[in-house]
Image (cartoon, rainbow, N blue to C red):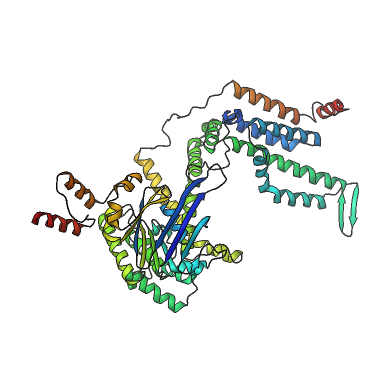
Amino acid sequence: MNNVVFGQYYPTGSVVHRLDARIKLLAVIFYIITVFFIRDYVMYAAMFVFIIGLTLVAKIPLKVLLRTVRTIVFLVLVTSIINLFFTTGEVLWVHWKFIKIYKEGVEHAIKLALRLILLMLFPSLLTLTTTPMELTDALESLMKPLKLIKVPVHAIALIMSIALRMIPILMEETNKIMLAQKARGADFDTGGALKKAKAMVPVLVPLFVGAFRRADELALAMDARCYSSVAKRTKYKVMRLTAKDFVAGFICFAVFSLVFLNKYLWPFDQMVLALFK
Amino acid sequence: MSIEVKDLSYVYSPGTPYAAAALNGVSITVNEGDFLGIIGKTGSGKSTFIQHLNALIKLQSGSIKVYDVDLTQKKPDLKKLRGTVGMVMQYPEYQLFDETVEKDVGYGPKNLGLSEEEIKCRVKEAVELVGLNYKEVADRSPFELSGGQKRRVAIAGVIAMRPRVLILDEPTAGLDPRGKKDIMSLVKRLKETSSPTIIIISHDMDAVAENCDKVALFSEGKIQAVGSPREVFYDANALALAEMDVPSVVKIARELQKKGVSLQGKPVTREELVEAIRRWRDE
């Protein structure tokens, strides 16, 4: 358990993995904004192609990336169905008793599903290719300007990295406690929801007690080594932007701008369609 | 015969890049009345092995029979098994959870589906067996007890299920010398009064040599040697292979041997050593 990196980091050592985490994080932010502005299918398709291409470059099996979408399947289905039935429009396709499905509703549902899936895919690619520690460092670096308005950036970053570090430890602890209570005849698998929730009490109480004990010990250990949140400290791994980071950043910026401004500046999709005619 | 293990093998996370073999063809028989000590380096498969005996780990290959529960069957009677085999994990005090000692110790018996009266009776008996004053601690929160008392309460929680086999995973870890001695004499008392068969994992070779009548030496998922403490602790090859130390009594006997003092009878306990030295002096 200990040597397994938490999260879904999928090490392949590709160029995407080695990119500066700050660039990747900025790209994800720009990407999310872009996805909200997409209106037509061609642009959705363009985004999917871009992500698949990036996944290939990152040497991550497509299956692994698609697995991340599984977690939101339920959300996608529910929102799509709601949109399907409750969007009104001009072209009525189905009318059966009180159910009315409009052409606009169908379109709405499809686009919403596509948008949600897109919103899941790219950030997943980020966490697949970046370790949680790199992400925290990147966030700290990007939040630096906030120091000017007295935001405790370093403390926030520290809290995040400690929280990330504790997750595998607590997972192991949970496992141990569950085994111990099972040995005392606990049954976690049968019964209804209420019974199952009740069965978790003998696991959760020791888990919380343990978490507080660990927090106490960690604080003491940090204190003993004179840790101070205001001290000026240097980094063990200094983040430096290199040429490949600028190239990658430029490519992402270019692609997203193209998609983002499609409707407003030029009919990019019309040009692509014309090529195929 | 209480426990029979044949050709047990186990691999953690099989079929993934993280696959790791923990047990590799382990066979051993434990008889009723045995005091078995399991020794071996960290990662030699000791804990994985004992977790199998309580079906905390699903059997992958090989066979285990605990009294009349056969773990190779599709749906073994786990309730019965866990009532038969009591397991005290490492640092058991970290598993206490209930408001009072009474309720916490009664958790196991309650899971066995016993009546209120029976539970109360067993809790009282178990708390007193581990050397605590029932009247004093019953209504207190287990969290306000001292470290040693907490461990006793946790052990009582397992004893209250009246297991015929009691397994303890490093019961003396993290205690001071006095606490270690207390817990070991508690274990011996439990063997005489409630659980006739004891299996103990320990890194304390002296304690194993003093108390156990059978020792199993684990190394890289295999049993390197099994037998009486005398046989195992004087098996220099097996110990070297497993990179294990010997009890101080054996160490002293070895040093004396180097100085030309050859003792008779391969002593492993302190009394035996004293006796052997006396006999040598008299000759």
Residue A238 drawn at (x, y percent):
49, 27
Q: Can residue A40 be seen in this view?
A: no
Residue A124 drawn at (x, y percent):
63, 39
Instruction: Write the residue at 66% across / 37% down.
Output: A122
Q: Is residue A250 left or right of residue A223?
A: right
Residue lying at the far bottom in this picture: please name it: B117
Decide which of B68, B263 is in the foreground and name it: B263
Q: Is residue A147 left or right of residue B43?
A: right
Decide which of B20, A183 is in the foreground and name it: B20
Residue A260 drawn at (x, y percent):
74, 31
Above-or-below relation of A198 to A25: below
Q: Quadrant of the C terminus of chain A?
A: top right
Residue A259 sits in quarter: top right
Above-or-below relation of B212 to B20: below
Instruction: Write the residue at 37% across / 61% down.
Output: B199
How many marks can you see? 0
Residue B101 sits in quarter: bottom left
Above-or-below relation of A25 to B45: above
Residue lying at the far top in this picture: please name it: A243
Instruction: Write the residue at 28% across / 61% down.
Output: B211
Decide which of B235, A190 is in the foreground and name it: B235
Residue B162 drawn at (x, y percent):
40, 71
Decide which of B153, B75 is in the foreground and name it: B75
Q: Is residue A31 visible?
A: yes
